[in-house]
Image (cartoon, rainbow, N blue to C red):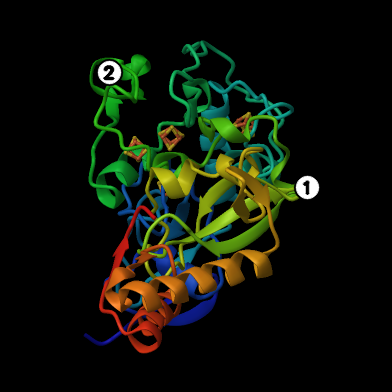
Amino acid sequence: MADIHITIDGKQLSVPRDSTVMEAAEKAGIQIPKLCAHPALKPIGACRVCLVEVEKQRGLQPSCTFPVSEGMVVHTNTPAVREARRFVLELLLSDHPMDCMTCEQSGACELQDLAYEYGIKESRYPGQQHSWPEQEANPFIYRDYNKCILCRRCIRACDEINGVEAIGLIRRGWDTKVGTAYDGSLQDSPCEFCGMCMEICPTGALTPVMRAGAGRTWEMKKVTTTCPYCGVGCTLDLMVKDNKVTSAQSNWDGAANKGWTCVKGRFGWDYVHNEERLTTPLIKKDGEFVEATWDEALDLVADKFVEIAQQNGPDALAFLSSAKCTNEENYLVQKMARGLFGTNNVDHCARL
Ligand code: SF4
Ligand code: SF4
Ligand code: SF4
Ligand code: FES
C-alpha cells in the first residue's frame, strides 16, 4: 500500500497508511508526551496526555490512537494542546502522593518527567486521595497502587506480551484499581513473575523489591548482557551500582526475547553476590576440598581423563555440557569427546 502524505508541526511527511499520528510524529523526530502508550503494546487512548490538534477535527484528539489520513495537518505543541495536557496531568496528580523524594522510581518516572516538563508542582484540583494498602507479600514486585495512574500498561503487558492475564481492572468508578481476581496476592494468581508489568509501568506503582534502597537510576551503570540461565540467550540490561547488580531491565532490542524475560532472568541475580559462591576451583586432597589454581585443576582433570580412557577405553568417559554455554563452547565439548577421546557419549542438560 502506498504511503500517504501528512503535515505535522509544519513538517511534510510520507508515512505508512496504517500509522497513528503519534507513530508518524515519532518517525519525524517529534516526541509527543505519552503515559498509557508504549511501543510494545496496542494503543488504547486511556490517559489523554498525548492530545494534539488535528485540523478539521472538533476538539483535541489522542495521537496514540488517531489514524493518519491523506492531507492531514497536525499541531502537537500549541497553547491549547499544552493547556489540555497540563489539565490532564493535574488531574492525575490530584490523586497522587507526590512522594518523589523517597520514591524508588524517581529519575526514571514518566509522570515525574512530564510534571517537570509542564512545571507542575501541585495540582489545582485537591480532593479525595486513595489510600490503598501497599502490597509487598511477594519477594519480587513491590506494589503501591497509590502511585498508579490506571494507564493499564501492566494489564496489557501481562496479556499481550506474557499471555497470562493475571491482573486486570477490578471494582468500578472511584474504587477502580489494578488487581488479581478477588484482589488477592500475586502468588495466589496465575502470575509467573516475569516482571513485565513492573518493567512497563510508567510510575513508581510497581518496583523491584530487591532494588529498594539500592540507589538512584542515575547512579547506576546499565550493562547489557546475555542471561546465563538457559539456552534461549535472552538479552538483559543489568543495572549496576558499585559493582553490584541491583536489578535487571528489559532490553527491547534483544534478538531472542525482544524485552521479555522469565522470572529467573528478571529477578534471579542475587546469586552473583552470594558469599557461598565458589570463586576458585577446589581439589580434593586427603578427603578435603582445598583451593587450587585453574592450571592445577585443569591438569588434574586432563590426567584423569587420559588415565580412565587408557585403562577402560574411551566409552568409559561421558561428556555433559550445558544449554547455558554458547554454541561454540558446546561444539568444542563434542569435538573433544569425539575427536580427541573417540567416544560419542555426549549429552547436555539445561540445568547444568
Ligand atoms: S511515581 Fe513518579 S511522580 Fe509519583 S512519587 Fe514516584 S517518582 Fe514521583
Ligand atoms: S509479573 Fe508477569 S505474569 Fe505476573 S502480573 Fe506481572 S506481567 Fe503478569
Ligand atoms: S500499576 Fe503502573 S502500569 Fe499498571 S495501571 Fe498503574 S500506573 Fe499503569
Ligand atoms: S498516550 Fe495517548 S491516550 Fe495515553
In the image, 319: left or right of 87? left
Amino acid identity at mark 2: Arg
Q: Which mark's residue is nearer the viewer, 2 or 1?
A: 1
Q: Name the residue under label 2.
A: 172
Secondary structure found at label 2: loop
Q: Residue at x 40, y 31 (%)?
A: 150
Q: Nearer the viewer, residue 310 or 338?
A: 310
Residue 118, can we see it?
yes
Mark 1 CB near ligand 1 (8 Å cut): no
Is 155 located above or below residue 254 in the figure?
Answer: above
Q: Residue at x 27, y 74 (%)?
A: 315
CB within 8 Å, label 2 to label 1:
no
Q: Distance between the residues labelled 2 and 1?
A: 45 Å
From the top left corner, tell me how far across and down residue 173 is, in percent.
31, 18
Q: Mark 1 points at which residue?
A: 242
- Mark 2 burial class by Cα count in 10 Å: few <14, some 14-19, many 20+: few
Amino acid identity at mark 1: Asp
